[in-house]
Amino acid sequence: MNVSSFKDILRYVQQNKPKKIAIAAAQDTDVLEAVIKAKNLGIAEAILVGDWKKIKEILHLLEIKKDIFQVIDIKGTKEAAQKAVSLVRNMEADILMKGLIPTSELLKAVLDKENGLRGNNLLSHVAVFEFEQYNRLFILSDAAMNIAPNLEEKRQIIENAVFVARAIGIELPKVAVLSAVELVNPAINSTLDAANLSKMAERGQIKNAIIDGPLALDNAVSEKAAAHKGIHSPVAGKADVLIVPNIEAGNVLYKSFVYFAHAKSAGILAGAKAPVVLTSRSDSAETKINSISLSILMSNLNGSVKQIMKNDN
Ligand code: COD
């Protein structure tokens, strides 16, 4: 599969049977609009877990029949999150999506050791971007979950991002571990981590990707900038995946892509037993559908990509 736009992802997931999304605290107009659209596109069904009275009012305002989705009436957001997580855990739903609930509350339910959705890896946020001037998708991580990852956490963040890259058809993704400069500077910790991660990849401690760093953003994405600096690297200027040093750098880069570069975007949590869609209030309707499509793609390929990675190890 070769994917170079969100339209390609949507077309791809439309070829499969609709997936089931469990919405935690579904009493949210934007989220309900997104799942109605996903249903109309034929890509998803939903189980609405939340305050039925409020959900009913929203569906009425949207002029949508109140019985189009299965509903589980739970008023408390914490309890709704636990129920939605359990639906995914018990495989009654394929994907978890955040409704009207604080992110931290949902993440607590997801991270719960006994009843959550933790897999063997760290959970991390993986964002995908489509820019008008590039004919390929870019991946950015972690802009929203892990605050100040250490070396081992960054290794797992890379693994999750590579998993998503391969799901969108980038067989051997080029991963740039970003910092402010492209030379190792002991005073800038992220340059040390980046150099270590590159070496770990060389030694086979991170598989299925070509990894290089430290790289600054310009020489990661612009061949001209890389040539100007005399950087000889298979990743420089050609990166598919951008790994940021911490959540602040990631979040600023994410928002500058959207606000200054008008990038189209999608985001999911990877590394869990199933994809988690964590859209925020400020996300456009298009971003919400892109994120749902991406989560469906991940859910479809979950088994096969995991298998591919297992075989490669
Ligand atoms: N993956 C797997 N397990 C994790 C992860 C993870 N990413 N993070 C924490 N855990 C586990 C820990 O090992 C531990 O067992 C348990 O969860 C609790 O760990 P704490 O005490 O570090 O976790 P919390 O609850 O204090 O914090 C976890 C959050 C994800 C809530 C925290 O990291 C956070 O607030 N992240 C930023 C979220 C945010 O504000 N994003 C911006 C939105 S755009």
Image (cartoon, rainbow, N blue to C red):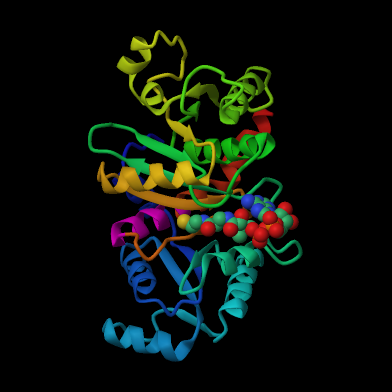
Is 307 left or right of 138, judged from the image as shown? right
From the viewer's perspective, is residue 159 above or below residue 281? above
Does the image show residue 117?
Answer: no
For the image shown, how many numbered marks are present on the structure? 0
138 vs 51: above or below: above
> Is residue 50 placed above or below 237 in the rendered structure?
below
User: Where is residue 159 shown, x and y percent of the image?
Assistant: 60, 36
Residue drawn 63% across and 63% down? 110
What secondary structure characterizes most of the magenta part?
helix
The residue sitting at 41% across, 84% down in the picture is: 55
Please provide the residue range marked out in magenta: 284-295
- Percent from the top left, x then y, of residue 270? 56, 49
Quadrant where the N terminus sits is top left
User: What's the residue at 47%, 54% (across, down)?
Assistant: 295
Q: Residue 42: where, in percent of width, then height?
A: 35, 63
Query: Is residue 179 depicted above or below 184 in this figure?
Result: below
